[in-house]
Image (cartoon, helix red, strand yellow):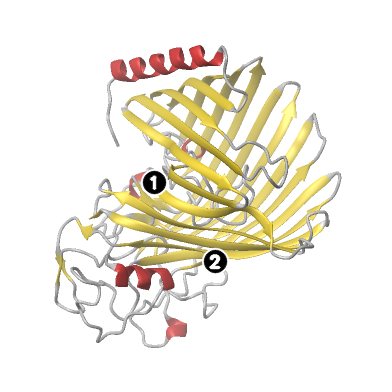
Amino acid sequence: MTHIDLKASTLLFVGLLVMTKAYSQKAPDDLHYEITAGTYLSTGKTLPFWMRANQYGEVPLESGIFTLQGQISRDYKPRTGETDKFSYGYGVRMVGNVGKTNQFLLPEAYVKVRYGAFELYGGRRKEMVGLADSTLSSGSFIWSGNALPIPKIEIAVRNYTPLVKSGLISAKGNFSHGWFGSSQEHAKDYYLHQKSLYVRIGKPDWRFKMHLGANHQAQWGGRPTEPYIYKLTGELVTKYGSNFRAYRAILFGEPIKPDADPDLFGEGTFNESSNRAGNHLGTVDVALEYNSPKANILLYRQSIYEDGSLFYLSNIHDGLNGLALTFKQVDQGIKKVVVEYLHTTDQGGGVGSGVTVPELRGRDNYFNNGAYRDGWTYKGQTIGTPFIMPWTQLTGFEYKGSVSRFIGNNRVKAIILGMQSKVWKLDLITRVSYSKNWGLYNYKINKAQTSIQQSIALPIGLYSIQTGLYYDRGSLLEKNFGLQLAVKRSF
């Protein structure tokens, strides 16, 4: 996180505005520009939950923020035929926040190339991973858009591509390598391995379709910020294995034998003897879709895996369940409704991983890890569902005792309602969530939380006047009322 003062932030965005205005006089049709100025205010010391959640790390925790945002992007040219296979695109998005928190962020800075069905891209880019609604969802379980995007290089089939000529079976997926960098607190310079594969059964013009697939995420390599003694082996850990043998173990999720050669992964340690190198997690997803001329219905389920509990179905109750109903050709009134239920309390049961019976191995402790103690976070924000929170964001109470893990609340039951509608020229987004929160297995709490969002946008030519009202009530987060005001100019 880079800190800047008000003068530097203002000069930066004035320069971007001048440049954008100059280009916009004769801007190519495939270029898009945006400039936004706004503020985030609240009655509490922090900003309400839905003001911060799933904002790709752009909105800080502290209240009293003035923000300037600028964006330039070029998307792919539309496909016009079999010979028009190649295209390229790029994007840069800059955010300057000034107030209780001063920061300059690059949520997006990427270049992408398309050839046929394949895409190669490098940099930061906003995205979600998993089968879920892409606009009103509370966020995919494993990769929700809550944290600042992680820089990576990726090859992907971005859209469903037929595997058979009839189009009955189509597939998409990705394979990428990313960098967490040196900004994490408890470990430094470690990597991201990510891959996914999703299959759609049903021809494009069929009303009924089935989607299923899975994704695999892993944190690996790097080093602990402070060396430590690994209790199981007694060795001093100064670095985690990062050679090609370590990468192979990450790629295939290979179990590490207790008597494995300690030099197996070169300099460093595999740090997870009797388990696996690195920190592995992901979801197995399934969805049913019904598409009619009047509406699209998507019913989806995401089941999480971390420590093998899902293989034995001992954490099968945990997951994200959703129903998205999109109304077509609706100009006024309700356009989309999404209802979700998040359940994360089981975690394979209350018995830890020290037992010898795999079926009883529980306490998965979602998004926490013993070696990568920052857990499944990036720059202090949860990468997955925002309802699993770090200790730093539990603002409604003071916890007691030592904090050995970064995530402080991962046992949650939540119901979320999202609605998109239009009244006159006003575009409305409504969200209401209610959650019960039990902390961790080894640090139990019992906190209820209600959070509400009502956003309103009024388009006026190339401008959009945006406002949002937010409310938090409960004992997990501080009682809070928030207000967002912004003006956006598109070119």
Where is 261 relative to 219, above or below? Answer: below
Instruction: Classify mark 1: helix, strand or loop.
Output: loop
Query: What is the three-letter code of the residue carrying label 1?
Result: Pro
Which quarter of the figure is the C terminus placed in?
top right
CB atoms at circles 1 and 2 under 8 Å apart? Answer: no
- Toward the viewer: 451 or 200? 200
Most distant residue in the right direction = 293
Mark 1, mark 2: which one is toward the viewer?
1
Q: Which mark is residue 151?
A: 1
Does residue 159 appear to the left or right of 437 in the view shown?
Answer: right
Which quarter of the figure is the N terminus placed in?
top left
Residue 341's x, y, as percent?
Answer: 61, 56
- Label 2 Cα crowd, 10 Å radius (few <14 / some 14-19 / many 20+): many
Residue 369's x, y, as percent?
Answer: 33, 64
Which residue in the protein does label 2 denote?
Answer: 318
Residue 188's x, y, as percent?
Answer: 24, 53
- Toward the viewer: 396 or 78? 78
